[in-house]
Image (tube, rainbow, N blue to C red):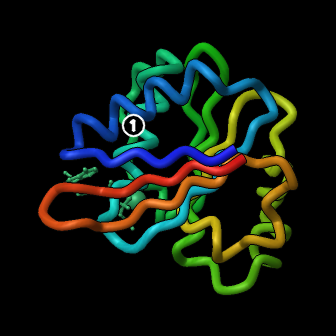
Amino acid sequence: MERVVVTKGPEETVRLGEELAGELREGDVVALVGELGTGKTTLVKGIAQGLFVREAVISPSFILARTYQGRVPLHHLDAYRVTDPEELREVGLTELLPPEEGITVVEWADRIAELIPPGSLWVELEHLEGDRRRITLRR
Ligand SMILES: Nc1ncnc2c1ncn2[C@@H]1O[C@H](COP(=O)(O)OP(=O)(O)OP(=O)(O)O)[C@@H](O)[C@H]1O
Ligand SMILES: [Mg+2]
């Protein structure tokens, strides 16, 4: 299945994430792909809201991964600084791909594509003019 959504600002991207959260099940992996500033973390904020996470979602870039408690655990990975997928294996993060409990969302998933399990939800974000973003969802 493929779905294409154009959002006109960050609020709409957050809302899309909230909606998506309602469709996610434990063990799911959401793989986010898109250039700097396309809205990957913004979408994760929406997913977190939809999962009733109360903590603020911040970019996990420097620590690779954070887990938030919500309706189910939300694991937020950022592969931006990963140069070799082996790095994730060494620190045990491949256990979250897929997670035994909760949902895993990965920013810059294309950088560790070989570690993303089959059947994951791939979400590609692209800049359009101004605050518009084209968001393509493929399962
Ligand atoms: N339609 C939109 N959807 C999402 N963010 C938008 C949109 N329009 C403008 N923005 C702005 O673009 C920025 C997106 O930042 P965000 O951190 O979500 O991107 P990112 O893809 O995670 O970047 P990075 O690659 O640095 O992790 C925010 O400042 C947000 O307010
Ligand atoms: Mg980000």
* Residue at 68% across, 42% down: 104
What residue did someone put label 1 on? Answer: 45
Relative depth, front residue between 114 and 88: 114
The residue drawn where x is 47% and y is 64% is 61
Identify the element where label 1 is drawn: helix
Amino acid type for the residue under numbered disc 1: Lys
Taking the image as shown, residue 119 lies to the left or right of residue 55, namely: right
| Residue that protrudes farthest toward the bottom in the picture | 83
The image quarter containing residue 57 is top left
Which quadrant holds the N terminus?
Answer: top right
> Can you give x and y, in whole percent of width and height, for residue 17 in the image?
44, 34
Q: Is residue 33 left or right of residue 9?
A: right
Q: Is residue 40 left or right of residue 75?
A: left
Give above or below for 94 relative to 128: above
* Residue at the image position 77 percent from the left and 77 percent from the top: 85
Q: Is residue 136 visible?
A: yes
Quadrant containing ligand 1: bottom left
Dividing the picture into quarters, in which one does residue 92 lie? bottom right
Q: Could you tell me which residue is drawn at 40 percent across and 33 percent down?
A: 16
Q: Residue 116's spot in the image, x, y percent? A: 79, 60
Q: How many marks?
A: 1
